[in-house]
């Protein structure tokens, strides 16, 4: 089998491609579009990017969703080159946040059912220094190896 292995190594096609392929991802951008002309201009600009597979535009929500093998900053810069003010989609669905009406999260300009994606809308597990009980990890709190769990109370 030595000769066959040697011939397969000699005849093997190796890739000389130096660049790594970008991962498939979806980029959401907020762009204010007033008419069909604005929508067409943004769609044509984004569709011409190499690697774009799908472009969805929702003019009512001012949202552009681009799917493909693209870089998010490149898509954002291409949309900005059309003369429109653009930013990454700053909203999340209000069901995904714990405090949707936190002062920084609630936004009157957000589409219906969405709030701003801010850190204040999600709870942070900060231990209270005045609490008599230490913060326990739940995975070890109820294990058989944790004998001291009953003596905390």
Image (cartoon, grey):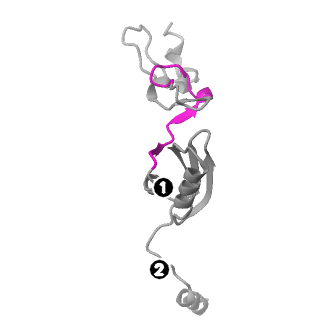
Q: Tell which tag, 2 or 1, sits nearer the viewer.
A: 1
In which quadrant of the rendered view does residue 131 lie?
Answer: top left
**Residue at figure coordinates x 46%, y 30% from the top left:** 118
Q: What is the chief secondary structure element of the magenta stretch?
A: loop
User: Quick one: SS at disc 1?
Assistant: helix
In which quadrant of the rendered view does residue 132 lie?
Answer: top left
**Residue at figure coordinates x 54%, y 65% from the top left:** 48
Q: Is residue 86 magenta?
A: yes
Residue 31 coordinates in the image, percent (x, y):
51, 44
Q: Is residue 6 magenta?
A: no
- Could you tell me if residue 69 is visible in this image? no
**Residue at figure coordinates x 48%, y 55% from the top left:** 75
Q: In what quadrant of the picture does the N terminus appear?
A: bottom right
The single residue placed furthest to the left in the displayed view is: 129
Of residues 137 and 45, the one drawn nearer to the viewer in this rendering = 45
C-alpha distance separating marks 2 and 1: 28 Å
Of residues 22 and 5, the one drawn nearer to the viewer in this rendering = 22
Residue 126 coordinates in the image, percent (x, y):
42, 20
Classify 23 as above or below 60. below
Classify 48 as above or below 2. above
Specify the segment rendered in magenta: 84-106
- Could you tell me if residue 51 is visible in this image? yes
* Residue at the spot of label 2: 16
* Residue at the spot of label 1: 75
Residue 88 coordinates in the image, percent (x, y):
48, 44
Residue 104 coordinates in the image, percent (x, y):
45, 24
Neighbor class of circle 2 (other Cα within 10 Å; few <14, some 14-19, many 20+) is few
Of residues 131 and 79, the one drawn nearer to the viewer in this rendering = 79
């Amino acid at each position: 089998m030595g000769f066959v292995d040697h011939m397969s190594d000699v005849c093997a096609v190796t890739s000389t491609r130096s660049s790594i392929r970008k991962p498939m991802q979806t980029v959401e951008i907020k762009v204010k579009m007033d008419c069909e002309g604005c929508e067409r201009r943004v769609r044509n600009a984004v569709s011409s990017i190499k690697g774009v597979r799908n472009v969805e535009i929702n003019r009512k929500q001012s949202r552009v969703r681009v799917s493909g093998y693209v870089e998010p900053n490149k898509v954002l810069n291409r949309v900005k080159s059309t003369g429109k003010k653009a930013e990454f989609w700053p909203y999340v669905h209000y069901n995904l946040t714990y405090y949707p009406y936190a002062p920084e999260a609630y936004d009157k300009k957000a589409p219906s059912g969405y709030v701003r994606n801010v850190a204040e809308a999600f709870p942070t597990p900060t231990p209270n220094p005045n609490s008599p009980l230490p913060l326990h990890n739940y995975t070890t709190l109820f294990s058989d190896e944790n004998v001291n769990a009953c003596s905390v109370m």
